[in-house]
Image: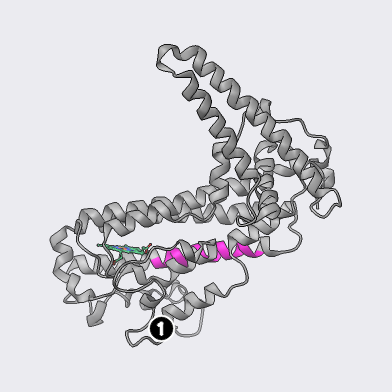
Amino acid sequence: MGTDGPLTYWDYIRVEDLLDLQGGVEDDEVDLANEEVVFITVHQVFELWFKLVLRELRTARDLFCRDVVANQELSGAARSLDRVITILGRATDHFLVMETLSTRDYLAFRDKLTTASGFQSAQMRELEIVLGLDSAERIDAGPAGNWLEMLRNHDGSESWSSRRVLAALNERHSLKEAIERWLARTPIDGVAHDDPDAETKLGEFIANFLQAHAREADSACDVAIAQGGDGVDPQARRLRAEKEKEAVRAFFEPSEEEGGIERARIRCAMMFIETYRELPLLAWPREVLDKLVEAEQAFVLFRQRHARMVERIIGRRTGTGGSSGVDYLDAVAQTYRVFRDLWAIRTLQIRREAAPPLANPDYYGFAHDA
Ligand code: HEM
């Protein structure tokens, strides 16, 4: 810090410290090629964006961890998620800067990295954990060991990175868990989750929705057969409609293994909020659910974009972290999902006019705010 007196820009932003961090293993950038300084700087910029995204996700998560979440606070959560979406979108664009490196530019310093890889980015792992990625879903990167081992020091001792990630794993709830606790308490058609009749009423709501969905699926099928001429096999089309109906039933009647009645309540709350979003008290919850999907989409796009950038620069060779490279990255982009149920209800939703009428829509007027 500088001398006493009014604050300066360079002291407040710590510009000197910041610009001193791009020296690589030599700790001196004077003899580094511009391309290596680009490589280091772009990674650092990403880590700073990750830091901000983590703060927003934890802020949103902590809000939903509360036993009561006031409706008027939901706009704050939506703002946090909006910031996550904006940052990730801009960060993804930064891969363009990386792509100013040719394959040969990168090969010129790649050996210096030895086993260092973005695979060891503690903040990336924290992001996944705070969002709620299930550890069982992770794909191993290959012979180099599993994702947690890769974060340890070479002698197997805990590192700065592994300690951060272990701490994140020990946090009480992920964003997904917190959101689902909140959804499980959402009153369905005016019936609170702890009402003695809650289970019966939930069953009635689901039965009504399934009927409405079946009517929609049947009428879409009738139209397709009537308009399709010879191109449509009526039997195959009806079979498809039956399969769609069966999938919706299975979604709302989950097995005990999937979480039974508790999971049914969460899924029903998602569908209820999406279907009746015009009711005043459901507008912000719906906005939050939509932003969660958008944020997850931004993560998926980040992964896909990274994979294409990697393919362009190193082709199909293995990664410095020991994975198969692009194949591993594509598999992760394809597989890792946190908010699966929120994605699933996009397949199951029906037209607004087809939704079953509610017994108690007034419950969701502003007068009933928590
Ligand atoms: C020349 C540029 C880059 C190349 C060639 C590259 C290559 C790779 C490869 C091959 C992997 C798979 C793991 C391995 O075997 O190493 C990987 C993982 C990763 N990289 Fe990059 N990368 C580059 C730039 C970046 C940048 C700028 C970031 C931004 C932070 C980044 C973040 C990551 C992350 C987070 C992973 C872990 C992905 C996962 O396990 O899901 N990479 N990278």
Q: Nearer the viewer, residue 184 or 96?
A: 184
Please name the residue shown 15% across and 63% down the image: 105
Local secondary structure at mark 1: loop
Write down the region rendered in magenta: 47-62
The percent coordinates of residue 278 (x first, y second) are 70, 35
Answer left or right for 189 relative to 119. Answer: right
**Main SS, magenta residues:** helix
Q: Nearer the viewer, residue 89 or 232?
A: 232
Amino acid of disc 1: Ser
Characterize the local packing of mark 1: few (<14), some (14-19) or many (20 or more) Cα atoms within 10 angstroms. few
Q: Which residue is mark 1?
A: 159
Q: Nearer the viewer, residue 93 or 262?
A: 262
Please name the residue shown 82% across and 55% down the image: 194
Please name the residue shown 53% across and 61% down the image: 131
Please name the residue shown 42% across and 54% down the image: 335
How many numbered tags mark residues here? 1
